[in-house]
Amino acid sequence: MTRAQGATGGADPADARDDTTGRASGAGAGATGAPQRGSGLTRRQLLGASAALGGAAWVLRATVGPDSAQAGAPVPPGLPAGTELYQRVFQNWSGEIRTDQLWTCAPRTPEEVPALADWAHANGWRLRASGYRHTWAPLTVADRTPESARVLLVDTSRHLTALTADSPTTVRVQTGATMEALLAHLADRGLGLTACPAPGEITVGGVLAIGGHGTAVPAAGEVRPEGHGYGSVSNQVVRLTAVVLDPGSGRYVLRTFDRSEADSAAFLVHLGRAFLTEVVLRAGADRPLRCVSRLDIPASELFARPGTAPDGGLLGGVLGGVLGGGQGRGPRTFAEFVERDGRAEAIWFAYTDYPWLKTWSVAPTKPTASLAVDHPYNYPFSDSVPEPVARLAAEIVSGAWGSAPLFGQLQYLVAMVGLTGDLTQVLLSGGLLRGLLSGDVLTHLLAGGLRSDLWGPSRTLLQYVRPSTLRVTANGYAILARRADLQWVVSEFAAYYRELLATYQARGEFPVNGAVEIRVTGTDDPAQSGVPGARPPLLSALRPRADRPDWDTAVWFDVLAFPGTPGLERFARDLEQWLLRTFDGTRAGFRVEWSKGWAYTADAAWADQDLIGRVIPESLRAGGGPGWDEAVAVLDRHDPHRVFGNPFLDGLLR
């Protein structure tokens, strides 16, 4: 029922969510104008009703060949011989970006892409890599891009999917391969990653484009094994191949960059301003994980201000000890769980008091109480939306926005039953909730077994979001801070979020109907790549601050809601401005999560020109050292014609 972690698709940030993580670009409307996510409520309600449920009505992915009577736009002239060409609607994860049928091609080999780039430059077209379109931000194309636009989508997911061993601890992967295929390949070789985005159906190229991440920092006493890292997936790259302009010939070519080359740092997170065809990634010996879920700690305690959390009492101590494998008083605050296990995620359904807390810990052997799993996607109640959740979601996006508190309670109870089998709160709930959670529904939720304590190879517990989950929109931010300030960061956010939600509710407004998601990672330490002379990804939200080496931790916040929710953009704007005031670089620093929503006005995301033109670039300039300006210059030097770009990126990366 939650979407979890964005990434982007193809070699571009528009993978379906992976794109990483949309609306439009520039300063006007439509294909060349500012994103209009806050407008057109009737149309968006229609989209939201289908997108929210991830059903066939959302997909609408029919393709039209160039000779079909349905093909409306003229065929692009003079394409390289053998180009596999068709028209296709681009629609992103949340349904907020939907274009006309756009010309699309699917190169069979990496060598076809430079020829396409030469063609695009000669004919005034632009190329946009595309995969599974797991995206929100307008990094690939704008909403309502017309079929007349001189944009050619390049689908990497059809053919550019090869995976081969490059060395005993590295893998050569083409950028159209899915993250699920990558982790399966590594697992077959006894390898794994410390953390990664939760969805499996996103492309490797999309994940890299936006600096996709999971949730992990070193636990107390944990020593980082060789090949593992605690930052973004981009930081695991040791070599990459990109399509760049050869200054001598004036033609586009494939060029391989070693991680030790200075220019490679601009390509590791490129937001769609480059096209990668292949990378070599480093991995380490796989470490089996134990994933424990609990819903018994109130938000007031889990997110308490440092030094103010009440003692969990006998029950809290027993549960903490049993579920955590420890003795005595178990953790009760978010920072305490992170300190013990190193890996944690909180999913806090709107208008509820008890978050769903997941923690992962390294466990070489199966704990007695754990259920062993050998495949990913182990939360069926979340992947296959239960009928009452689907029904209420459809009512909300059809206009029953005031049902958001009921929807939050319903999601919480479904998670409680599916994870623990505890029916107590269902029986104690109001008549409406009891009516929604009928005997048949409860039987279905319990049929797959309890999922609160799982153990298995890392990939089986790191990937847990299917495309069939609820389709929601999301904002996203990373707060860089000292590890010692983790609980302070979380507590400040939680207190303000709860206060803001209550303020809106008092006015009869319900701008949030999803959940808050909180994760924690390390920063992109280039030494973890194992390549001497490596530099961190220049545009990564996890790039360390040169002047603040003590800021070794990033806290990620996402707020989820159905597209078209009234007041959502205003709420997101209020929250964003508070984040900027609170984490202003004094005790912690602010950065955006590229794949999600940011730069809010009261009406739209990706529309605040001060954030786009000043605040966001400064967040990656602050502290000195290479960063924003070098990345823009390198990408421009290797693609001076901006074949790989769009109007929104033209305005952002300047």
Image (cartoon, rainbow, N blue to C red):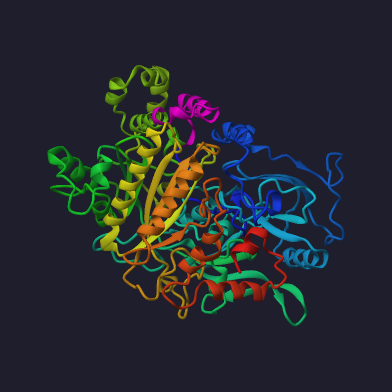
At x 85%, y 41%, the residue is 68
Q: In which image quadrant can residue 528 be found?
A: bottom left
Q: In what quadrant of the picture does the N terminus appear?
A: top left
At x 15%, y 49%, the residue is 327
Residue lying at the far front of the rendered structure: 507
* Residue 310 in view, yes or no: yes
**Residue 107 drawn above or below residue 117:** above
Residue 401 lies in the magenta-colored region: yes
**Residue 527 drawn above or below residue 108:** below
**Residue 626 drawn above or below residue 316:** below
* Residue 286 in view, yes or no: no
Query: In x, y percent, where is residue 8?
Result: 56, 54
Q: In which image quadrant can residue 269 be found?
A: bottom right
Question: Over which residues does the magenta segment extend?
Answer: 383-406
* Left or right placement of residue 266 versus residue 312 in this view: right
Q: In what quadrant of the picture does the C terminus appear?
A: bottom right
Query: In x, y percent, where is residue 44?
Result: 61, 36
At x 57%, y 77%, the residue is 263
